[in-house]
Image (cartoon, rainbow, N blue to C red):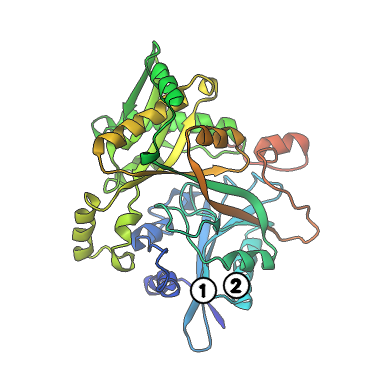
Amino acid sequence: MKIVEVTDKNLAREWLSVPKSLYRNDKNWVCPLDAEIEGIFNPDNNLCFERGKAVRWFLVNDSNEKIGRIAAFYDNKKVNHYKQPTGGAGFFECIDNQEAANMLFDTARRWLESQGMQAMLAPVNFGENYNYWGLLVEGFTKQGYGMPYNFPYYQKLFENYGFREFFGQFTFHKLLSNGWSERMLKFAEYTETRPGYSFEHFSYKKLDKFVDDFVFTYNTIWSHYHDGYTPLQHSEIRKLVDDARLVIREEFIWFAYDNGKPAGLMVAFPDINQILSRIKNGELTFFNKLKFFWYRKRAVDRTRVFIFGILPEYQNTGIIAALFLQLVKTLDKTKKYKEIELSWVGDYNPKMIAVYEKIGTTKEKKHATYIHLFDPAAEYYRFDNTFEGKLYIKKHASAKVLDDKPNSD
């Protein structure tokens, strides 16, 4: 077996082809768009390259057949949010062979060590965690757009190598035909009409306003919840919105306001995996683009909630129920949507898990984010929102962390 580093466009195409071969007989796998995955590893497209590096490799056997792949990366604004400098590995694919998997993991580990890392999270994304993050360990069915799918044996490959679970990520589903509790609806409707509260969906006509509101709301929520959170910038969200025009439905993205001040947000996309499953090999050829537009209005009956958050001071006001009600009413008007997927919520977030359970969702999938400590003597720990960033530094003054206070463009 031989490791091949991706150093040019031809090798990048070979790297992209690995899962297409492995999953060719698996009806649950949906091939993501090549352009989207390749964009993650394009320095002109991914701002993470301004703060770090990424490398990709694939593995070939003695017959020169591609049997696995992996990527490794780090972001200097995130590496010190853990007990030790930590990078990431992701986009792992492999045949059911521990030796092959170990070669891929070893390659990622050695490169990360050469960059000063002492641990790696995997499988994760070189970017935000709402896409391509985590190993599927429960619920081997078709995944929502951006949620990873893999063979069940991957868990064995990871854990045999020495990876241990850092945290779990639950995905909840709700069939609209099951209805909603009358008590929840009345409470949401009451909150919706409280003086000062208002709810508005995203519109490209007021793009800058909504991008500003998103950045403020998202950064305020997650910098409060995660002490080591890396703030998003206006330029990042503006680019994301521009790139996602094909899939965004304006009325699926909602903001809550209190006297004009942002108080919460919900971002849902139509589940375009229902379209991508009909497009061959994730390639947006001219014919496949025509198919995409054709099926966009005819084949999608499920939506995925990517982001759902409320500012801390509004978390006990009922705004979260009223915000969710806006999406429910929107879906009812379309007459074609049948299901909502809410993914994902961490096992360390009991409040949000309780909210999802109260609105009648069912827990149907679990992904796991793993950590591998390079020093066998290092103490294993699970993420519980205690050890990140400055919260950990306050307890361990000898450690080092990058200053990562929220900022804006």
The residue under label 2 is: 101
Q: Is residue 308 above or below residue 45?
A: above
Left or right side of 308 for 396: right
| Tag 1: amino acid | Gly
Please, what secondary structure does the residue beneath circle 1 have?
strand
Q: Position of residue 103 (x, y in %)?
A: 61, 74
The residue under label 1 is: 68
The outermost residue toward the bottom is 63
Say if mark 1 contacts mark 2, CB within 8 Å. Answer: yes
Does the rendering let one see residue 263? no
Residue 323: quadrant of the picture: top left
- Who comes first in sequence, dot 1 or dot 2? 1
Rendered residue at 78%/52% (across/down): 379
Q: Is residue 154 above or below residue 36?
A: below
Rendered residue at 47%/38% (across/down): 232
Q: Is residue 382 above or below residue 376?
A: above
Rendered residue at 50%/67% (across/down): 56
